[in-house]
Amino acid sequence: MSAVVIRTVQCAASIRTLLAAVTLAAGALPSFVNAQDVPKSQPVATAPAPRTTLPLKLAPRPTKSAITADDLMTRLYIFADDSLMGRDAGTEGSFKATELLAREAKRLGLQPAGDSGTFFQTLPLKSKKVDPMSSFIAGGASLELGKEWGFMSGSTMTFNDTPVVFGGVMGEQSLLPAEQVAGKLVVLTVPASRSALQQALEGNVDVPAGASGIVLVLPQQAAGYVGYVLSTGLFVDDPAFGGPRLIVGATVMSKLFTSPSSELKAGTVGTSVNVKAILDVVPSPFPARNVVAILPGSDPKLKHQYVAVGAHSDHVGMSRRAVDHDSVLIFNRIVRPGGAENDDKMGNAEQFTQINAELAEMRKSSPTRRDSIFNGADDDGSGSVAVQEIAELLSTMKVKPKRSTLFVWHVGEEKGLWGSKFFTAHSTVARDSIVAQLNIDMVGRGSATDVTGISKEGQDLRGGPDYLQLVGSRRLSTELGDLVESVNKAKTHNLLFDYGMDANDHPMNIYCRSDHYEYAKWGVPVTFFTTGGHSAYHQLTDEPQYIDYPHMERVAKLIADVAQELGNRPGRPVVNQAKLDPRGVCKQ
């Protein structure tokens, strides 16, 4: 699952936290014997430490047609192995992961539905290097690159004496007539929310017709992220990801307009600016690829409609520096039960005393293991292999579902929903032929010791033996939400659904943070299946040995039955709720 951008309206402490949220990877943990000066403001955790008897490595075995815990385990130990180096999009590890997925899709007899008769839909991923001689002069003042301004573009941008015009708030802006923006840079202020900030930095923000480009003004709380767009070397060069944009800090507004920001109205013309944003662009050394496959339906008419089942294949890669795996495991469980969601928690003296004691006990039976790989077993190895198991089950049925099943393993979800954004903008099947999308992201945990999220009111949510979170299942189609409930009951899966993370205005904004959203914004009914968060979220400790495979089997079987019900029912789920603006800012 994609990491949060900002936790409230305040920014996190570093650019690295912004999307990868790999806070403990950047260096060694603090000494567990020198914690006397840490504040005593946080309670000591009392939940028992999760234990596992599963091995660190597992020899692969042949899989069966049925969905089983053993098959899921075999698949996940392969897919989340160290050899795939954390599967970061645009790297060798991600390339290898997509090779594995395509090879298995071919073995299962699925039809390729990517580019040119292949299983791959390749994103136009490119690498950029920003020239430090880039310049931005506004109101006679030269802005500091990386601190006061940054830019996103597929090529060098030059603006000479180009006037700016205020367009309003991003996502709520007035549609100024073409003649009013012609030849100008349109300035939009970015709302102080995590979804708006993610949209501004890596989402689709359209350039108004006739305008030369856009200038996005980040809120004061997010000033530290102006340089983020310069620090990310990889980007998707596609119109679906927005046009050329300049990113500036809030203080720059006074250089663009003579009137205070609070008095500006849409259409107000400001100063003229001179910009030279210089960069070298080359293709990424390793392609970023969606893996797309189809199981044709058995009904001559309905086979041209699709039930989409998806997950994301990527994770967040590797740390530059190896740290002690067990220290991270214990530290996060006690101090950061939400993993990267709690990266602002540093621990207190009592907690470090408990950490020391548990680590000393662990050292009696296990030696120190240095670790630098974010294996992403749960996020989202669990979803990726669950999709494989569902594909194997459906492909071996004597009578296939009437509708076709569209399997998509999206790439780059951790980068800002890259793969699903690209696929839905350039779908290899007719987009309106997709009757529903079932998204599987992090379905390998959810025990009673896991903090799976928080309620809208801020109370911890915890898992259990029958636990499963659902998000978005009734946001477009109440019929789809009812169908998932009825399948769970009729097929005696007996899972207990937690809708706590699906509340409107939930501060964690989960509905906007995984691949289902890119389908929902185009009017496709979705359900996001997840067992929720935990202390290994975006951490080095998200490994196959900590996954609950019997629980994961139950979740995968439920989703397979939902997919079959959707594939065989006479009509598609009726969309009876308000549709989203596909170019607007996602708000849960």
Image (tube, rainbow, N blue to C red):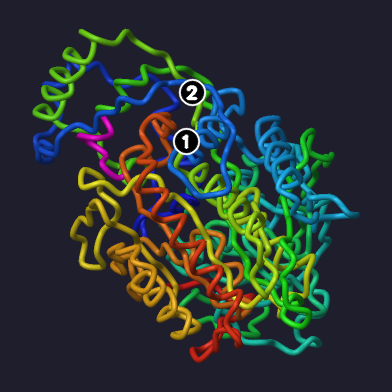
Observer-nearest of 295 and 353: 295
Label at residue 58: 2
Q: Is residue 492 above or below residue 557?
A: below
Observer-nearest of 422 and 556: 556
| Outermost residue to the front | 398
Q: Is residue 142 above or below residue 26?
A: below
Q: Which circle's residue, 1 or 2, is located before the other in the chain?
A: 2
Q: Secondary structure at mark 1?
A: helix
Crowd band around label 2 with a 10 angstrom C-alpha radius: few (<14), some (14–19), many (20+): some
Observer-nearest of 540 and 381: 381
- Distance Cα–Cα, label 1 vs label 2: 9 Å
- Tell me the amino acid under the disc marked 1: Met
Q: Secondary structure at mark 2?
A: loop
Residue matched to label 1 = 73
- Report the span colored magenta: 331-338
x then y, percent, for residue 542: 41, 34
x then y, percent, for residue 271: 69, 70
Secondary structure predominantly adopted by residues drawn in magenta: helix
Residue 344 can be seen, yes or no: yes
Query: Mark 1–mark 2 contact, CB under 8 Å?
Result: yes
Residue at the image position 58 percent from the left and 54 percent from the top: 393
x then y, percent, for residue 257: 60, 72
